[in-house]
Image (cartoon, rainbow, N blue to C red):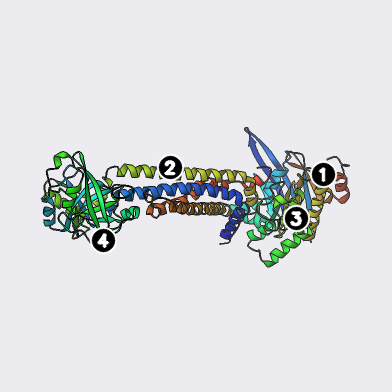
Amino acid sequence: MKDIFLATYLAVKEVVRNRGRFLMVALVIALITVLVLFIAALGEGLSDANRQYVANLDAQLIVFLEKSDYSITASRLETNTVKSVRRIDGVADAGPIYTSNSEIVSLPEPLKISLLGAEADRPGMPALIEGRYFRGGEAREAVMDLSVAERSNLKIGDEIEIRSTQGTEDEFYSLTIVGLVDEQAYFFQPTIFVPAATWELMRPQASSDLGSDTPYPNIIAVKLNDPLQVEEMKQRLVNQISNIEVADIETTINNIPGYTAQQGTVQTQGGFTLLIGILVIGGFFQIQILQKVPQIGVLKAIGSSNFVVGLSAIIQIVIVTAIGVGIGAVLNYLFSLGLPPAIPLDFNGTRSLIAIALLLLIGPLGGMVSIIYAIRIEPLKALRLG
Amino acid sequence: MKHSALEVRDLVKSFTVDGIAFNAVDHVSFKVNSGEFVALVGPSGSGKTTMLSILAALLTPTSGQVKIDGQDLAKMSETERVKLRREKIGFTFQSNNLIPFLTAQENVEFMLRLNGVLGHAGRLRSGELLARLGLADRLHNLPAQMSGGQQQRVAIARALIHEPTLVLADEPTASLDTERAFQVVETFAHLIHESERAGIIVTHDLRMCKHVDRVLQMEDGKLVRIYEGKKEIKELSQGVLKH
């Protein structure tokens, strides 16, 4: 215990008495922190913007058209498949999901949205946080995601106009907002939910599709009686229904177009930034230790143990890293206050917390070489012989 | 009766350079009693610093015996050597003596911290010791804010504060002007005598031997001559005697 106090005493005294020098390296760590947290927040934000709707589905399995490679956009199921799925033993409920894109044009700035068709109170339709679900049929009613409301100041009861390219013509449709859901971004866009028939009417479509008024779901969200029986139910569905393939939620997310590549890129960037952090911190502390060789020699010569010298170096690195990460986190927070909602940054995500934990680790990790070096310094360095 | 603080018997330290072995310390024996201040002199390469390193338990001898306060260094583990240096030995070095981020008083108190005995009394004693060394107004100064002579006096205080058996000084006056060098050695000698410690000063400047009780002269690793008696030492320090 005495040695721990002694090491802490030495570390704190040196940091306080040389605060200018240590603050400088803390600021470098702060900049690295800003960069790492920004990348982490971007990764979290992009990830959310891409998968939020699928990740928050009240379902365990997703049914796709066979050979669609679990791609939502490539999958288009027969209308009676939903009923077939619901009849399978072990399925609690199933809901069709229809996906397309559209644009709200009745706002000062047009807003691109994901136009999703779903059945109220079925898997695929998220829980309301305000208002009511739309009625069935071709009701001109919509439930909007909170992110649409945040970007457009729309509220329940407001009427919106959406544009849809059908054939070679732009068609415009009116919808009344009747309900609000939260955290339902999909494919980088805020979402609007409408009944299946309304979706079929309003979705952008090629000239060849215009004659049909039957909505074909892209996928079906399946809620199981026993959420733990995912693998068994997957097999059962494939065996009993023809022309389908089934995936769990994670597989579905990973197959959202571009999701895996994008997340891989962001994570690689984050990893490299951390690596740069390790090298910068390692370099700084190595130079510092090299400058302190005679001083460490004196400390050892007068009776300080290797444990005290090594622990003191570790404590010092931890203090400086913690200060740097703290400053960086505050800077990030201030930075996040000024960002528009359209930029997909999420500073509150798990990744930011992991990034902070990793940043706190890179200090001692980067300084490891210098700590080992300090421990190996011979006390003879205090004498001219060294 | 004064007891033997340091005993060196038939000490040898060999090195091999470019395949050629030589004895940096060659069968040296001597004793230093408590309250005795001894100078170790000799030309560059004579083995003074190697000898000091062995006495400081920083270097292991090839053969022979070193006893500090009756404890045989050869029989000690590395941990025991660290403890011995902390408790039984006081050091001053030629340069880089003090911990640069600690004030004068903190540097002195550090030895008490190391030994886990820093209390109110220890703090008072360190302040008093520094005041006796003329540094009452420098207690809270960092080493960089003090002159070389002042730094050496702080180092002397640090070397003595924990009441070690043996105080070792490696060229403590090398970076000082003559006047300050004399002051430092005189103060050192006074405190060694007063506190009944055994002191060894390594120096190449014979003028600094004026305040010591004995001079051990080394050459090519051997102890070639011992100067004793005030007259002989005075003559040596004044350059009357050829060494």
Q: Residues within 10 Å of mark 3 (few under 14, many from 20)?
A: many
Callouts 4 and 2 in the same chain: yes
- Residue B98 or residue A262, whichever sits in front: A262
Q: Is residue A67 visible?
A: yes
Provide the residue designation for mark 4: A128
Amino acid type shown at disc 1? Leu
* Residue B152 marker: none
- Quarter holding the N terminus of chain A is bottom right
Q: Nearer the viewer, mark 4 or mark 3?
A: 4
Amino acid type shown at disc 2? Phe
Mark 2, secondary structure of its residue = helix
- Residue B229 or residue A5, whichever sits in front: A5
Q: Residues within 10 Å of mark 2 (few under 14, many from 20)?
A: few
Mark 1, secondary structure of its residue = helix
Callouts 2 and 1 in the same chain: no
Callouts 2 and 3 in the same chain: no
Q: Is residue B20 above or below residue B12?
A: above
Provide the residue designation for mark 1: B206
The CA distance from mark 2 to mark 3 is: 59 Å
Pinpoint residue A384: horizontal percent, then vertical percent: 69, 43
Provide the residue designation for mark 3: B198
Q: How many marks?
A: 4
Q: Residues within 10 Å of mark 1 (few under 14, many from 20)?
A: many
Mark 3, secondary structure of its residue = strand
